[in-house]
Image (spheres, coloured by chain):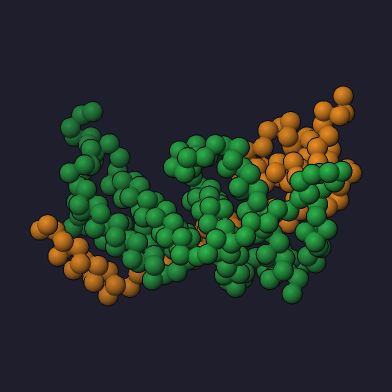
């Protein structure tokens, strides 16, 4: 690579150039502004420490986002490990004649015709967040990475040492539980 | 022939979840569609799952742009400054 084309880091301008961008990126994923600020702060500090490892191949912002992503994953890990391990309940009969059928208490109920009218609602977002937090540790970690952070399947698999089919089973269980949780707490009260 | 396309509800909902990320194959989607013909529960599940995806995408992308206040940035600037010498 030509030396002129290399990206350089200028930490003095980080806050002016990137703070808002990183903050928005974070707030969409952790939903609490205090925590988002802390994570952005930590990212800048970590960036400062790691400056000598910067090779100039990516732009400054891309590089900072990469650090931030790690910080967000660490945060997910932390909040998840502080909670008790929730009981994992299966949603389907796993044996016998009814194998693979819906369990009666898990059958989706109709949500009413106005269910999709309120999706602008902020409370709805909060309810969803609460439901995600109720998921078992591994489920919510995988779910967040896949759904909210848009990680590629193989990235998550590598990071968490699981197989792709494992990942889809986890996503499947997470979404089934999430649906049930939202039904109980939001759509049919 | 049709037997090859027959799936149970567990498989059907798994395909539905995959398709939320655009990762279901054409064959899988076809299986799912065929399953709907005989299973209204999974059709309903899919409808609700689509709605959840819509909400999730909203809360991910649709948040109004928020920024930190100048004071907060100033604080951060000082903090960063104090670590520079290290």
Residue B62 in percent (x, y) is at 54, 61
Examine the rendered structure and indicate whether residue A136 appears above or below residue B28: below
**Does residue A40 appear left or right of residue A82 in this picture?**
left
Residue A164 in percent (x, y) is at 57, 37
Q: Nearer the viewer, residue A61 or A153?
A: A153
Query: Does any portion of residue A117 appear in the rendered image?
Result: no
Chain A, colour shown: green
Q: Which chain: orange?
A: B
Check the image and name the residue furthest to the left. Answer: B85
**Does residue A112 appear left or right of residue A55 in this picture?**
right
Task: Identify which residue is drawn at 74% across, 31% down.
Answer: B27
Q: Nearer the viewer, residue B73 or B39?
A: B39
Q: Nearer the viewer, residue A148 or A14?
A: A148
Q: Quadrant of residue A130?
A: bottom right
Q: Quadrant of residue B28?
A: top right
Q: Quadrant of residue A53?
A: top left
């Amino acid at each position: 690579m030509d030396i002129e084309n290399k990206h350089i880091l200028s930490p003095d301008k980080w806050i002016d150039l990137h703070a808002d961008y990183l903050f928005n990126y974070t707030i969409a994923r952790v939903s609490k502004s205090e925590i988002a600020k802390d994570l952005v702060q930590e990212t800048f500090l970590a960036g400062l420490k790691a400056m000598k490892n910067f090779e100039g191949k990516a732009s400054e912002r891309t590089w900072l986002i990469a650090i931030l992503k790690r910080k967000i994953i660490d945060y997910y890990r932390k909040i998840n490990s502080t909670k008790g391990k929730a009981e994992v309940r299966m949603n389907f009969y796993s044996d016998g004649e009814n194998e693979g059928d819906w369990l009666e208490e898990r059958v989706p109920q109709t949500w009413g015709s106005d269910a999709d009218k309120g999706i602008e609602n902020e409370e709805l977002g909060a309810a969803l967040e609460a439901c995600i937090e109720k998921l078992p540790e591994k489920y919510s970690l995988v779910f967040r990475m896949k759904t909210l952070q848009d990680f590629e399947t193989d990235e998550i698999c590598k990071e968490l040492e699981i197989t792709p089919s494992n990942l889809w089973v986890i996503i499947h269980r997470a979404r089934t539980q999430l649906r049930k949780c939202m039904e109980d707490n939001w759509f049919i009260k | 022939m049709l037997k090859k396309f027959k799936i149970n509800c567990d498989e059907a909902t798994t395909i539905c979840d995959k398709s939320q990320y655009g990762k279901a194959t054409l064959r899988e989607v076809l299986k799912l569609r065929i399953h709907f013909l005989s299973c209204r529960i999974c059709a309903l599940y899919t409808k609700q799952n689509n709605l959840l995806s819509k909400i999730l995408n909203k809360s991910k992308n649709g948040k109004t742009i928020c920024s930190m206040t100048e004071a907060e940035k100033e604080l951060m600037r000082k903090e960063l400054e104090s670590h520079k010498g290290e």
